[in-house]
Image: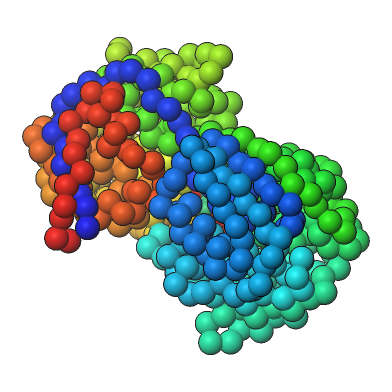
Amino acid sequence: MYAFKIQGGYQLKGEVEINGAKNAILPIMIAALLTKEPLELSNISYLSDVNTLSDLLKSMGMKIKSKKNSLILTADKITNFHADYNFVSKMRASFWVLGPLLARFGEAEVSLPGGCAIGTRPVDLYLNALKEMGAEIKVENGYVCAKGPLHGADIFFPKVSVGATHNTIMAAVLTKGTTTIHNPALEPEVMDLIDVLVKMGAKISGIGTKVLTIEGVDELHGAKHNVVADRIEAATFAVAAALTKGKIFLKGAKSNLMTAVIEPLKLSNVVFKEEKDGILVDATKASLKSTSLTTSEYPGFPTDAQAPLSALLSLAPGMSLIEERIFENRFMHIPELKRMGANITVLNNNAVLITGVKNLSGAQVMSSDLRGGVSLVLAALTAKGESIVKRIYHIDRGYYQLEKKLTKLGAKIKRIKSKN
Ligand code: UD1
């Protein structure tokens, strides 16, 4: 295993390249299952989640060629409709192969993902939608065994789910008849998937609204697509700038996709300037301010930016309140931040009260999940002394070469071997 060794207290300055969003790359790679023609994707970073999904798709017969920052995926000979537990337990998004396999081939056998560190994360919304579309679904030996044919249906999501929206849209585009999805997720990554599907010949209307209408087509074709920039990676570097009173140009980032994260940072006097090819974040005159945040669906404050902001607010004088409304257990990083000197009370599993402290101090801490892990790196960048952040395989799932990017900005961070 590896860990990050970080010496805190260095101001970050310079330019950082924001890669294509992990949460868009994954569903779009899966969308390649919907056509026998090649799907060419650019602005790809080889995150460990991307590698895991490549392995799963290859195990089904997909051909995947990778060039610098791009992937060509061809699903002309899919021979295996089985997504093994080994893949799905490692990365939940693997479950999303269910909809496209069922729509194109009429059958799929996909492992149930189970819970994960941030909550139980059920899949009832996915399965109910497919059942409404006529799928015959049995759960056997930990696998969802589904059979078509599917037909168009009127689907109402009682709760907004990014994954269930991806999965249902991908099933509907190749399903005869009209499917209407009420209350879909509107996250930019969902919009990016829809963008690709339309390029592939899908007939989708109501894009960007709370009612999507999809007319199924017989076949989709290949397409080329440049994946949308990762708003959570951009938010992470913006927080790094704020914590170190630095100045960072987020190359490729778009501020209109991250308004909810920018707002609390602006309160702390961090200046955001949208430029032609990115955002300049100037925190050289920042003075951190406490605030209250509640996570919610897009365009609300993203749950994935909650942990990074909690690191920031632990240094903001006064009291801050963070409420987590998307996942039931997303404060696993808090005990670790406390080990670095943060004064945080977990009120219940869904809220924390943060009393700002003057300084954090370096410590050995452990990542428990992707965003919680990166919040510890952020805290370490500003903490007095040395920190060791362990179990960084969580962080590698969603941040490509984080230590290289931070080093280029002036941080003192090294990847080192670690026994645990
Ligand atoms: C995706 C993102 C993740 C982000 C999350 C919320 C990817 C790869 N992951 O995860 O980074 O934090 O959206 O923006 O894109 N739920 C149900 N039943 C279901 C499905 C979901 O109750 O069938 C619940 C979940 O437990 C959770 C909420 O709905 O409480 C939202 O989860 P969802 O939007 O589905 O998250 P993911 O798609 O898994």
Q: Nearer the viewer, residue 118 or 163?
A: 163
* Image coordinates for residue 259, horizontal then vertical, percent: 53, 28
Q: On the picture, is 95 further left or further right than 32?
A: left
Q: On the picture, is 113 further left or further right than 123?
A: left
* Image coordinates for residue 48, horizontal then vertical, percent: 41, 52
- Taking the spot 61% from the left edge, 47% from the top edge, the residue there is 72
Q: Is residue 145 above or below residue 202?
A: below
- Taking the spot 31% from the left edge, 54% from the top edge, the residue there is 393
- Taking the spot 65% from the left edge, 80% from the top edge, the residue there is 145
Q: On the picture, is 28 further left or further right than 8?
A: right
Corner quadrant of residue 218: bottom right
Q: Nearer the viewer, residue 347 or 32?
A: 32
- The quarter of the picture where the N terminus appears is bottom left
Outermost residue on the right side: it is 177
Of the four image quadrants, the one with ligand 1 is: bottom right
**Can the viewer see residue 382 in this picture?**
no
Outermost residue on the bottom side: it is 141
Corner quadrant of residue 94: bottom right
- Taking the spot 44% from the left edge, 45% from the top edge, the residue there is 46
**Can the viewer see residue 58 in this picture?**
yes
